[in-house]
Image (cartoon, coloured by chain):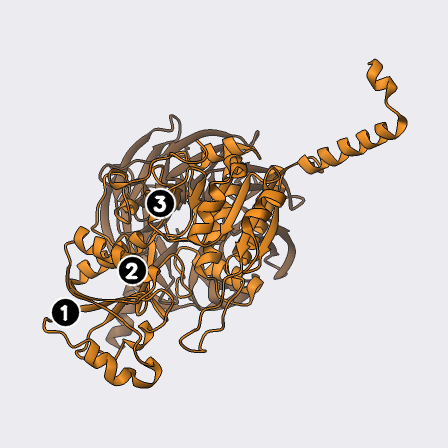
Amino acid sequence: MRSIKMLPRLAWIIFIIFQLVASNFLFAKGKQVIKIAYLTQTQKVRPVLSNLDPVIENKGVLGAELAIEDNNTTGEYTKQKFFLEKFIIPVDGNVVDTFNKQIAKKYAFVVTNLASDVTNKVADLDAAKAILLFDVATIDDALRNQDCRANVLHLLPSRAMRADALAQYMMKKRWTKWFLVVGNTEEDKLYAEATKRAAKKFNMKIVQEKTWEHTFDARRTAQSDVAVFTQLDEDYEVLVVADEQGEFGEYLDYRTWIPRPVIGTQGLVATSWHRAHEQWGATQIQNRFKEKAGRWMEEQDYGAYLAVRAIGEAATRAKSNELKPIKDYLLSDQFALQGYKGTSLSFRSWDHQLRQPVLLAAPRSLVAVAPIEGFLHPKTELDTLGYDQPETECKWSKSGE
Amino acid sequence: MNKQILSAILLILAASAQAETVFVTLEKDNALAIVDPIAGELIKTVEVGQRPRGIAISPDNKVIYIATSDDNIIKMIDTETLKEIGTLPSGDDPETFALNPKGDTLYISNEDDSRVTVMDIAKKKVIKQIQVGVEPEGITVSPDSRWVVSASETTNMLHWIDAKTNIIVENTLVDARPRAVTFTSDSKFAWATSEMASSLSIVDASTKQIVKRITFEVQGVTKDKIQPVGVVIDKENKRGYVALGPANRVAVINAKTYEVEKYLLVGQRVWNLAFSPDQKRLYTTNGVSNDISIIDLDNLTVTKSLGVGNYPWGVAVKP
């Protein structure tokens, strides 16, 4: 008591102000506060094949904002208040620096829309140990297997899930002989790997694999070049293209030597979200998003929406704003996230991948939703897509846990 | 007299003799199916407007109300002539609504706007719009007219609206994606289905607390296919029935012990349920197999399925 008496008046005032600020920070008007950071880095715009679609630079963030609004509607009734703070790092900026200085110790939940290598760089920071990261950008299988991190959850379906979804549908159609065309980027090779894994898993035959070398200007000579390129000795039923950046894939359809459909990264694509999707209440969120954003919802928007909604759902159920109870709830059997896909979504305990149906879509129509009926699983048919528990190479060795 | 007219008259006579008509909204056909369940016949189909879903009949059995979602109105249809006799402005995208026991007020869920619209039917005027959770869907009025309960699918809550003041006085957090809610005839309990959690929550109307949570399990059907939707409870509060969506079954629940007594196999993607006036039969709409199933409640067996048209959604019965 003596020490308090000795405190000068000014210090007292500062102390009282601090108390007020601190209590405000934790309980805005008697509400429990849950603060979420959204961290992204602007990507270099790659050259596009055509000017048909406008380049969207804010993929992700608007989904997070919509979800914050939804969380706060619920929060009105549960006396919780959700805040979203956005950290947008320029192309040449330092993500780690921003994370350490502005996010660490201030946020327990961080939605990351970052490249694969940057995602793990952030996850491995000391400051990230007491943080749960919600990755809404990567689709790498490595990040869900050998390079997995215990403090990262992945919202978008991995390449393996996408390839399996396509393979299931091809099996249903009995289009089992594939011609695989691969671009020359690292991502294209990973997509091709996932395709080959799916082919093996579902007993498809890849009759031939070819690399697209970009040795000519597709815009001018595609008509003749694609025909020559797709002339094989052996017959095939579908052409599977691996071209994630969209550098040539769009030029394959209708130009092949023999009439064959194109699937993969172009043609019939496997995706977590699509503008043609309107079942299971999807129309409602499509409308709400469009009204807010003035454009269609993209995959990263959907991922960020789910990430923030997942935090909201867990915070509401666990009645908490702290990392441990929320993380425990997110990874528990009770967690059931509504994602407008006709079944509840949850996280796989072995690699923190969000289990979810994968949409198979043509440019203007939804063709099918995987898992395709008939592909069975003892626990949930959703686990017929991607790496199931017995196959996982993920060991929680680094960060967290 | 023309043969066709004669047979039509005979049909109508036959129907009125049995004195029970089932009305089914056909979401995809923009139509209403009129069924004689005793004869097991589809009497006819009439056009009603775009994407009809929610349906209810006035207490005097004279008017059918139908939410035609894509027209953004509620239509009033004469139960005898089957002609449109008026419309009610419902606000955007009406899907489901509830009629109070007196039959003078409609409570409409406006999914896109997160609102419940309160409508004076006689004046055809909106009395109030109440802000609720995100994507309100299921809505019901307690038989004692005290409560209006609105279930919001994304907020996962039941909002208890005082029917006198039209103000939310309490909220109950339930399992993921609540779809439908109904009261026991004594107004003491509300039963709410949660589509994404394969569960049913039974909520005490006095405390607004969940007193029992039932999780459905069907052998040979994975949990993600068990998606509870429509729910009804009989007048004696003996049994409740829950439609399980793509599990293609109706769960029979003992309303005293809360045990699931039986799962009845019906058509594909079973949505909504309605009793016959004597409560001896239950009618189900099956959205994917495009039919309705008729369940004999004395023997708990499905006695008939009857093709009605594309995407049967709502069902209502006139004595």
Few, some or many C-alpha atoms within 10 Å of disc 1 (few <14, some 14-19, many ≥20)?
A: some
Question: What is the display colour for chain B?
Answer: brown
Sooner in the amino-acid sequence: mark 1 or mark 2: 2
Q: Which sits in the foreground, A97 or B11? A: A97
**Where does label 1 land, which residue?**
A236
Residue A144, numbered label: 3
Q: Position of residue B145 (x, y in %)?
A: 57, 41
Q: Quadrant of the N terminus of chain A?
A: top right
Horizontal relation, residue B79 to residue A78: left or right: left
Are labels 3 and 1 assigned to the same chain? yes
Residue B5 picture quarter: bottom left
Sequence-first tag of 3 and 2: 3
Q: Quadrant of residue A401?
A: top left
Whether pointer 3 and pointer 1 mark residues with C-beta atoms closer than 8 Å, the reply is no
Residue at position x 32%, y 80% from top? A218
User: Is B128 above or below relative to A24?
Assistant: below
